[in-house]
Amino acid sequence: MDKGLTNEPMLDIFIYETAQNIEQLETAILASEKANCFSPNMVNEIFRIMHTIKGSASMMMYNNLTSLSHALEDLFYFIREEKPEQMDCAILSDIVLAGVDFIKLELEKVKNRSSLDGDPSSLIEDSRSFLSSIKGQGKLSELHSAEKEAAPPQQYYLSSKLISPGAELKCYEAVIFFDDDCEMENIRAFTITHNLKNYVQEFSYTPHNIIENHDSARMIREQGFRIVLRSDKDLDGVREFFSGAMFVRSLELRELSEEELQGQLGEGQGALQQEDAVKASVLQAQEQIESGPLEIRSAHQGIISVDVVKLDKLMDLMGEMVIAEAMVTQNPELKSLKLNSFYKAARQLQKITSEMQDMVMSIRMVPLSATFHKMQRIVRDMGRKLSKDVELTLIGANTEVDKNIIEHISDPLMHLVRNAIDHGIEAAKERSESGKPLIGQITLEAQTAGSDVLITVRDDGKGLNKEAILRKAMKNGLLNNPEKEMADREIYNLIFLPGFSTKENVTEFSGRGVGMDVVTKNLEAVGGSVTIDSEEGAGTLITLKIPLTLAIIDGMNIRVGKAKYTIPTTSIKETFRVRENDLFNDLDGNELIMVRGQCYPILRIHEIFAVKTETTKLTKGIMLMIEHDGRSLCIFADELLGQHQVVVKALPSYMKSIRRVEGLAGCALLGDGTISLILNISELVKV
Amino acid sequence: MEQTELLNQEEQSEDTLKGKYLIFSMGKELLGIEIRYITEIIGIQPITEVPEMPEYVIGITNLRGKIIPVMDARLRFKKEVREYDGRTCIIVLNTNDITIGLIVDSVSEVISIADEDIAPPTDINKGGHKYIKGIGKAGGSVKLLLDCQRLLTDEEGVMAPSLLN
C-alpha cells in the first residue's frame, strides 16, 4: 500500500507525459502521411518521442510498453540513419499508429490502476519485419536469430552505405596513437569522433564502446584508435583535421579502395558485439537528441499541467475576491468621508483585481486544436476502412473554449465527422459520376461569434435526402407534424432524434441510430445548440453553437421589485422607455408594443416569476428588447442597474432536484455580495 | 451507556458528535438537530428569492462565494411567519452533500441527550410531526428532535410546486 502511495505522483506524471507524447506522435505521423514522406525532422521527432516513451515505460516497469516502443524506436533509428528511399509510408504509418493505439489502450489501463496485460508481440513483429524489409534483408528468420538477445538492430548502419558504390566520396583509414601520458585515451578518442561528425560524411571506429568500456583506453593505447571514414575531402584535408586533434602522437592515414573497405568493415562488424552496439548507439542517440531540433523543445517549454479542480477553486476564490473588493471600496461607511488617497489606492486595487480576473478566465481557456487533431485520425482510419478518399481541413483550430466545454464537444464532433464520412461522402465511383473531385472534402471550422463559438462540420458529400428522412421518421413513428408543413430545417433536425438512422446497413462506424442524439444531448448540457443545413448532392453543413465559457458572462443587471436579474448583454438589442400610444393588445389580450413599425410581444418579469413590485405600469419601468435565434421580444423591468461581468453559478442542486425553473439559466454573485438570477433568453423567447 | 461507550471506543471520533444536539427555538417550542449535520451558524443575511420554488424554500444566499438554498423553519412546519430580528439565525446543515440553510428564531445551546431519554414521536404522520425523529428530555424541558435527512429530502418538496401552480 505504501509503495502504491509513493508511486502515485510518478504514475501521474507518466500518464500525463505519455499521453502528451502519444498525441504529438499521432499528429506527426498523420502529417507525414499526408505529405507522403517522413521528413528528417519528423523522423527525429518520432524517434525522440518513442525514445521518451520507452524510457519512462521502463522506469515504470511496463515491459510490454517498453518492448513495443523499443521496436518502434529501432525502426525510426534505422530510418533516421539510413534515410531509405523506397519506403512505403502508408505501411509505416499503419505500424506506428497501431503501436500508438496499443499504447493508448495500455495507458487507459494504467489510469484505471489495472494490470497491463496487452501483448504487443504481433505489433513488434510487424515493426521488425517492416524494418527488415526496408533494410533489404527480407529474411525474417535471419533477423530473429540476430536479435534473440533482444538486442536491437542498431548497428553501424553507415556500413551499408559505405559499401554502396557510385558515390564520389573517398574512403580513408586512420589509426591514431595518443601521447603516452595523456591518460583517458577513450575520452580523447571520443572527442575526435565528436568533432569528426561535423567534418566528414560517415565514419566508423574501433574500439566501439569508447565511453562505457574503460578497457577501451588500454586498447587504444596498445592498438591505436582506428577510424574508417568517408569524406569528400582529399587526403591532406583529412590529415589536417586529425593533426588538429589534441594529444595525438602519431597518425597513420591512408586511402582505402572499395575491396579493402569491404574487408575493413567485415572485420569491424565481426568485432562488434551486440551489447556494445546497444550502448554505442544509445550514446549516439542521446547525443543527437541533445543536439536535436531545438525548436521542438522550446515549444514545450514553460507549460505545466494543473488539476482542473484547482482551477475551479481559483475561479471561485477570484469571484469572492471581486466581491470582497467591492465590499471594501464601496463600503457605505466611507460615503461621508473625504479620502483622496484611499480612493486612489482603491482604484489601483480595482484595476489589479479586474486584470487578475481576466487572467484567471484565460487560464481556463484551451484551444480546440487538440480536439480537432483527434479528428484527423478518425478521418484517416475511416477513409481507409471504407476506401473513401477524404481530406480533412481544419480552420480556426486556435479558437479557445473553456476547458469544461471542450470535454463536452469532443464526442459530438467525433460523431459528426464519422457521419459525414460514412453517410455523407460518396464512394469514389459515385463521385466521379456526379462530376465531383475524387477526394471528398470535410471542413472543420471554429470561430467566435459574440459570446458563442461556432463550430461547423461541412462535407461535400451527397447531402441529406429529405424523402428518406421523412420515410424513416414515419416508419419509426417519430413524426409529429404533417410532413407538408415541415420546413427543410425541421426535417433535417429529425436526424437528431434518438433512434434515427437512415443507413440501411449498420457499419462499424455508424448506422446504429445512436450518435446524432448524443450530439444534441451533449450540446444541451453546455447550453449549446445544433443546426443543420443540407443541399442534396452538394453536401451538408452542421453548425454547433456553444457558449464560449460557462464561468463568466457580460451581463446587464435589472431590478424587478426587490429581486435582481441578469441578462446576457449579447442578447440585448436595445433598452428604451415606453410611450403610451405604442402599446396595444391583441385579441387574446396579449400585450404588444410597436417599435419603428415592428410589433413585439411584451414579457413582464414580475408576472412570469411572480415577483411583488410597485412598478406595473409599462410607461414607468424600462423595456429591454432581446433577440435570440431570430426571435425578438421585449422584457419589462423596473429599472436598469448597470452592466457588469458576472460569475455564473449554477442554482444549488437541492433546488434543481425540486424542479427546473423555466427561464432561469443560473445565478450570479454581484459586487455587493447579493445574488442575481440569470435569465435564460433562449427559453424566454419560446414562451 | 458508559459500557457501550467503552465498547465503541474504536468509533470514538464519531461518538464525540453523537448524542449532542443544537437546541433552537421556534415560538415557544424548542427543537434539536444533531450537531453532526451542522456546518455553522450565521446571522441573517440578504436572501434572493427564486421563483417557482415551494413556499418554505425562500431563496438562495451567498455563503462566502458558495450559493446555498435557504429554508424557513417556520414555513417548513407550517407555523405563522414573523419578522426576522437580531436573534434570527441561519443554521447551515449538510447531509448527503446537500448544503442548506435553515432559518430559525434563535439558537440557544448544545446539549447531550442520552438515547434512553429520547422517546419516539407520538403520531408520526401528522403534519410537521413527520420531521420529528424523537422527543428528547433534558434539563427539565422537552425538545423535539428533527430528522435532518427527511427535512431535506422529503418528497413533499417535489410535490409542492404542482400545488402552487
Image (cartoon, rainbow, N blue to C red):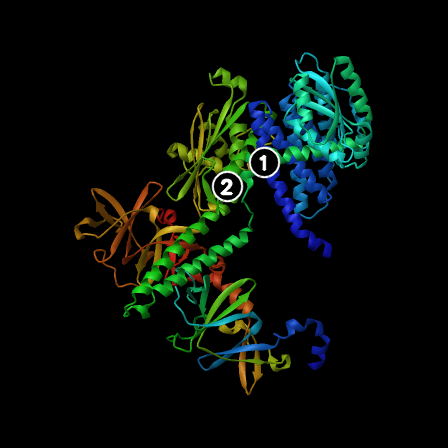
What's the residue at 32%, 42% (across, down)?
Answer: A631
Find residue A539 and report its image quarter.
top left
Q: Residue furthest top?
A: A166
What's the residue at 48%, 18% (across, down)?
Answer: A437
Assign a secondary structure to mark 2. helix
Q: Residue furthest bottom?
A: B140
Crowd around label 1: few <14 · some 14–19 · many ≥20 (10 Å): some
Residue ID for mark 1: A24
Please state if B81 lies on the left or on the right of B139 as rendered: left
- Chain that bears disc 2: A
Three-letter code, disc 1: Gln
State which quarter of the image contains the N terminus of chain B: bottom right
What's the residue at 42%, 40% (across, down)?
Answer: A453
Which sits in the foreground, A55 or A324? A55
Please state if A393 lies on the left or on the right of A616 as rendered: right
- When the figure is inspected, residue A645 is found, relative to residue B136, above or below; the finding is above
Q: Does residue A651 appear in this view?
A: no
Q: Position of residue A41 (x, y in %)?
A: 59, 28
Mark 1 or 2, closer to the camera: 1
Crowd around label 2: few <14 · some 14–19 · many ≥20 (10 Å): many
Q: Position of residue A388 (x, y in %)?
A: 56, 23
Residue ID for mark 2: A409
Q: Position of residue A62 (x, y in %)?
A: 72, 42
Find residue A230 and report its image quarter.
top right
Q: Which mark is residue A164?
A: none
> How far apart are labels 1 and 2 at the CA level?
21 Å
Three-letter code, disc 2: Ile
Which sits in the foreground, A339 or A72? A339
Q: Position of residue B134 (x, y in %)?
A: 57, 77
Assign a secondary structure to mark 1. helix
**Are the numbered discs 1 and 2 placed on the same chain, yes or no?**
yes
